[in-house]
Amino acid sequence: MRPPRLRAGPANQGEPGRAGRALHTLDNADLTTAVLAETATELTAELGDLTGRARQAVLLSRESASPTQVAAADHLLAQDPFGPAALFTEIDPTAAAVAAARWLAAAAEVTAEATSHSPTTLLLEADNIEALPHETPTLVLQLLEAGASPYDAVTGLVRHALHVADGLLPDPDGLREQLEDLDDELTEHTGPNTDPEDIGLRLTPLDPNRPAPDLLEDLLAGIHGCRLLHDEYAELDDEDDRDENRDDAEHTGPPHDRSNSHFAQLVREAAATHRDRLV
C-alpha cells in the first residue's frame, strides 16, 4: 500500500476555547465542575501518568504521544525488545508504537547486516518462514528510510486512520495514485470472471477502529519477524561451520547463539547508537 502523506499539526485546534465558551454560555456550575474533572483526567494522561481513570488511555488511539510515555515505552523495550506485557497495560498505545518503531528499525538494521537484505525487504522474506502482518511494519521502515522520525511516522499513520474512521478523505492525491496502481493490477491479474466483491481497496493500512494498538501489535510482530530471519541465516552459517570442521576432532568451539537473548542484545547495541531516531 502506498504510504499516506504525513502532515504535521494537531487536530481539533480551537476545541478547548469553544468548550470554554460553551460552558460560559450554559452557566451551569455542576456541568462546569464535571468537565473540569474530565479535563484534569485527560491532562494526567497527557503528562504520562496513567493511574486511576487515566489508565483508560491504553485503550484509545491518540493523534499525538506524550514524550514521558514515549520514554517509558522506550525503557520497557530496552529491557525486552520483543515487547513486554506492560507495554500494553501501562503505556498509551501511540506512544508505545513510537518507541516500537525505533526498536523495529534497530532490529531491521541488525538483521540486514546478517542477511544482506535491505531493511525494507526483510519482513517479506520473514513472511516465508512464518506468516506475519508484514505490510504495516514494512511501511513504517520505508517511512523511516525516507527520513521520517518514529514519532512522525507513527502519529501520521494513526492520524490518517482516525480521519478515515471519521469518514474523511485525508489524502486525495494519495488515493488517486492508489486507484491508478489498482487499475494496473486489475488489468494484469483479473479477467472477465472476476467477482467485483473480491476486489478491495484499503484506505488505511491500520484498523480504523483501533489504529494505535493495531500498529503497535504489527510493529512488535515486525521485530519478531526480524529475529526469525536472523536465526534462519545463523542456522545456515552454523551448517557451513560444521561442514568445514567435520573432520576436525579437536573442534570444540561454541555453537552460534541463536537465542532470543542474543538477538535482543544485538538490537540493544544497534538502538544505543541511534538515540536520535526516537523523535
Image: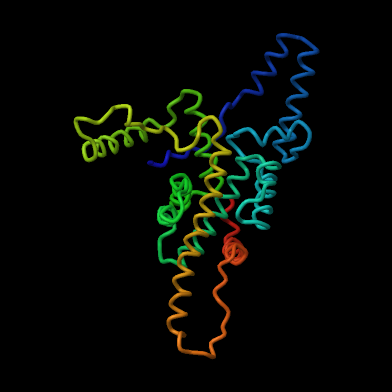
Q: Is residue 81 left or right of residue 226?
A: right
Residue 234: horizontal and vertical position, in percent? 49, 69
Color style of the picture: rainbow
Q: How many marks?
A: 0
The structure residue drawn at horizontal position 66% and vertical position 21%, both measured from the top left corner, is 17
As displayed, is residue 43 above or below residue 130? Answer: above
Front residue of 258/160: it is 258
Name the one closer to the observer, 60 or 125.
125
The picture places residue 223, in percent across and down from the top left corner, at 54, 54
Question: Among all residues in the image, which is located at the extreme left?
Answer: 192
Residue found 64% across the figure and 34% down from its top: 59
Report the front residue among 24 and 62: 62
- The part of the image, by quadrant, that contains residue 10 is top right
What residue do we see at 46% from left, 44% from top? 136
Is 37 drawn above or below residue 124 in the view shown? above
Looking at the figure, which quarter contains the N terminus? top left
Quick check: 31 left or right of 273? Answer: right
Q: In this view, does 229 lie above or below 27?
A: below
- Residue 183 or 67: which is nearer the viewer? 183
Please provide percent x and percent y for residue 230: 49, 64
Image-based side of 200 in relation to 58, left or right: left
Dividing the picture into quadrants, the one containing residue 62 is: top right
Estimate the x, y position of residue 143 in percent, counting from the top left. Answer: 45, 48
